[in-house]
Image (cartoon, grey):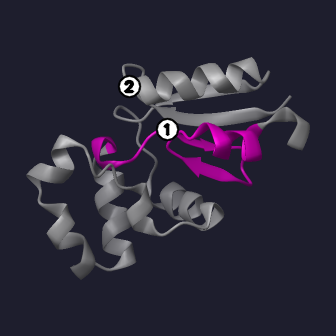
Amino acid sequence: MSNLKVYQYAKCGTCRKAVKWLEAQGHELELIPIFDTPPSEVELTELIQKSGLEVKKFFNTSGEVYKEQQLKDKLPGLSTEEQIRLLASNGRLIKRPIVTDGHKVTVGFKEDTYEQEWNNANL
């Protein structure tokens, strides 16, 4: 069994599915409310590096705040540091859930990705 840190929003259906799936695999979860306690710039930088994903994959592109701020048009003109600062400034901008064991990181919930990364048989 592993301890996983899960940045999530309790009312988010995708987050609930992810948490349920992870618990069914026997993981111990530390649930962090992403809107109340978003990851800091330092934490985000580390999460992004460990995920191997581009910064833009961490944005909740279907969220209201993303649309209100017209980030689809603005993001390409921002540096990586500016994008990370923006993410850290508002938990609603961050795609959720973010799951990490301190080594690996996944963003969002796709069961096949979770099977690959978080299935206890693979740990």
Q: Please state the horizontal and vertical placement of residue 93, each as a whole percent of the image.
A: 29, 48
The Cα atoms of the two marked residues, 2 and 1, are separated by 9 Å
Q: Please state the horizontal and vertical placement of residue 28, each as a whole percent of the image.
A: 74, 24
**Tag of residue 41:** none
Does 104 sit left or right of 82 as displayed? right
**Tag of residue 12:** 2
Residue drawn at x 70%, y 20% is: 23
| Start-end of magenta stretch | 91-118
| Residue linked to disc 1 | 97
Give above or below for 42 relative to 121. Answer: below
Q: Nearer the viewer, residue 47 or 13?
A: 13
Does 85 sit left or right of 58 as displayed? left
The residue tagged with tag 1: helix, strand or loop?
loop
Does 15 sit left or right of 117 as displayed? left
Task: Confirm whether residue 37 shows in the render.
Answer: yes
Q: Is residue 3 magenta?
A: no
The quadrant in which the C terminus is found is: top right
Residue drawn at x 54%, y 66% is: 53
Q: Is residue 108 magenta?
A: yes
Residue drawn at x 51%, y 36% is: 7
Q: Marks 2 and 1: CB-CB under 8 Å?
A: yes
Q: Amino acid at mark 2?
A: Cys
